[in-house]
Structure formats: structure tokens, C-alpha cells
Image (tube, grey):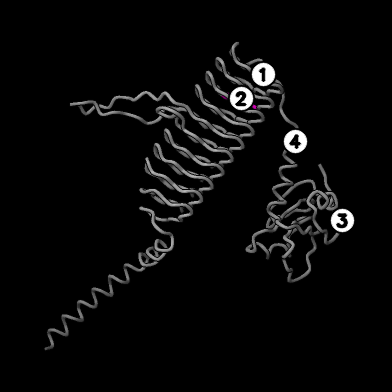
Amino acid sequence: MEFTAEQIAGFLNGKIEGNPAARVNDVSKIEEGKPGTLAFLANPKYEKYIYDTEATIVLINNDLALEKEVKATLIRVNDAYEAFASLLDLYEQSKPKKTGVSPNTSIAGSAICGENLYAGDFVYIGDDAKIGNNVRLYPQVFIGDNVTIGDSTTLYPGVKVLDDCQVGKNCIIHAGTVIGSDGFGFALEQNSTSRRKVPQVGNVVIGNDVEIGSNVSIDRATMGSTRIGNGVKMDNLIQIAHNVEIGDNSVVIAQAGVAGSTKIGKNVILAAQAGLVGHITIGDGAIIGAQSGVNRSLKEKEIVLGSPAFDIRKSRKSLAIFKNLPDLRNMLIQLEKDIKELKGSK
């Protein structure tokens, strides 16, 4: 589809600087802009590219002061990044959607499926499952017995939602993710070195408007529920253990891992490769830096870094000192030599 600058500005309530009739039919990065594409500039680090970009239209912030003339048509908006995201969402919605149920789909007779279901090849829907309206199940999705999938949720290829688990409305779960695999529970047998599996009889409950990346594993609870709150966003390759709870609108980034029964509050950020021990509580609004190892509970809005994790300001100071340890060691060795020489000269 093709759009003019005038149409785009009208949708975004933006102000045009340049040719209102300029047309685009694709998007591009500003540093890799091509004729006929739309780009955006939100990060000041990329400002230098706006003067040479070949993109036809560029979204910029209202407060950006340009140093020289720009050949692209500009559309000024309050927030260029948010505006660009809105356009991408509009573009995504305009793309043709797959429809219908493949003859290779297996749906149990007791399952209840809502209107406008899309189910690709080799989708399996188990006994007593409840599938809402406008749900999209891509090929090889597995829906276990007694599972609930809310309206307008999309499960991409190879997603597994195992028995008794619940997924809310307007969720997106990407390829290869497993919801409801057994929690890691083993009891050391008395007078023995062997470990006995503890049955995991709970489930996973996922709220509304949740997005989960690819190859994520969320374990079912030993008893009760592992819970993912409304609006939570999770990256790829994440492990969430049994009985964990994650509060509304929290963000979990790639390769993070949360051990069993940890309670994470609302609006928390877990950066990449963060690891949390079990049975702790993370307060609302806390931020855990990349590769941090958290071995204690955190207060509301506490920001930590390091392994073990502690206050980010102290952690940064410690890292600065750590980089200088070789020089400090050499200084100490030289100081010892100087002291010995002083003592020997007396």
C-alpha cells in the first residue's frame, strides 16, 4: 500500500515540512533510508543521518532543531518513536490474515471454539479446551486438555499450552514457547542419594495483553498457579519456574531466569541474563540490571546491578575500581619495595 505525507500527518496529527504529496510504500532505518520509504528519528545519536538519508519521509520530534536543510519531507510529532510504532501497527493490521481451520487440525469433540478461529496444519486442541473468538493458532500449536485461550490471542508455530493452563485476551506467544511444563521439583529420599520427582499439579495463568517471545519456558505450579500479570512483556529464551508471580506491566528481557516461588511486583524491569533466586519478593518498579544475580528481596523502585546484586551507584563505583586493580596492585608492590628500601637505609 502507498501513503502520502498528508495522509500520514493526518493520522498522526503531525505537521508537514516539505512536500505533502510525497509518497511511501515501505519503511526503513534512517541510516539505511531508500527512496519511497518512511523513516523516523527519535534518538539524538542518529541525527547526523537525517541530512543525508534517502528516505522520502522522516518522522521527527516537535522539539528537534535542525542544523541545516533536509531534502526529505518531514513530519513533526510529539514522539517520533511512538508515532512510528502506531504506523507499523496500522500497517500490520492492514495485511491479509489467514483464515479457516485446516483439515489436518485435530479438535476434541468436547472442545469449545469461538468465532473466526484460524488453525493451521497439525494444530491439536484437547478435551474440554475453550478457545475464544478471533484466536489464531499457527501450525503445530498444541492446546492441552481443559486449557482456556482468550479472545484475539495469537499463538505462533510450535507453541505448547499444556493441560489446565489459562491464557488471557489479546496475547501474543511466539514460536517454540512452552506454557505449563512441569516445575523442577525433586525430593531427596530418606537414607538415599536419589531424588524423587514431586508431582506438579498446579497450572499457569497468563493475564490479558501479554506478549511472550520465542523459546520461553513457564513452568506450572507445584500447587496453585504460576501467574503472569496483565500487560507483561517477555523477550526470548526466558525461564520462569514454578509458582513464580510476575506483576502487571513488568518487562523481562532475554535469557533472564526466575527461580521458584519468587514474587515480582508491578512495573518491574529484569534486564538481560538477570538471575533471581527463589522465595524472594521484588517490589513494584524495581529495576534489575543485566547479568545481575539477585539473592535477596528488593524494595519498591530499588535499582540494582552486579552479582550479587546491590545498589547500582555503588556497583558502578566498584566496577570502576575493579578495572584499576592491576594498577593498584603494581602501586602496592612498588610501595612495599620503597618502604623496605627506606628501612634498609637507616
> Residue placed at 46% from the left, 53% from the top?
289
Provide the residue span drawn in magenta.
Answer: 136-141
Instruction: Categorize mark 1 by other alpha carbons within 10 Å: few (<14), some (14-19), many (20+).
Output: some
How far apart are the two marked residues, 1 and 2, measured between alpha carbons?
A: 9 Å
Report, in whole angstroms, how far the alpha carbon at label 2 lies from the one at label 3.
43 Å
Residue type (three-letter) at the residue carrying disc 4: Lys
Q: In terms of sequence position, does the residue under pointer 2 or pointer 3 come before the other?
A: 3
Q: Mark number for residue 102?
A: 1
Image quadrant for the C terminus?
Answer: bottom left
Density class for disc 2 (Cα within 10 Å; few <14, some 14-19, many ≥20) is many
Which label belongs to residue 342?
none
Q: Residue at x 44, y 37 (%)?
A: 244
The residue to which callout 4 is attached is 95
Q: Earlier in the sequence, mark 1 or mark 4?
A: 4
Q: Which residue is mark 2?
A: 139
How packed mark 3 is, by other alpha carbons closer than 10 Å (few <14, some 14-19, many 20 or more), is some
Q: Residue furthest bottom?
A: 346
Q: Name the element at disc 2.
A: loop
> Please, what is the three-letter code of the amino acid marked with disc 2?
Pro
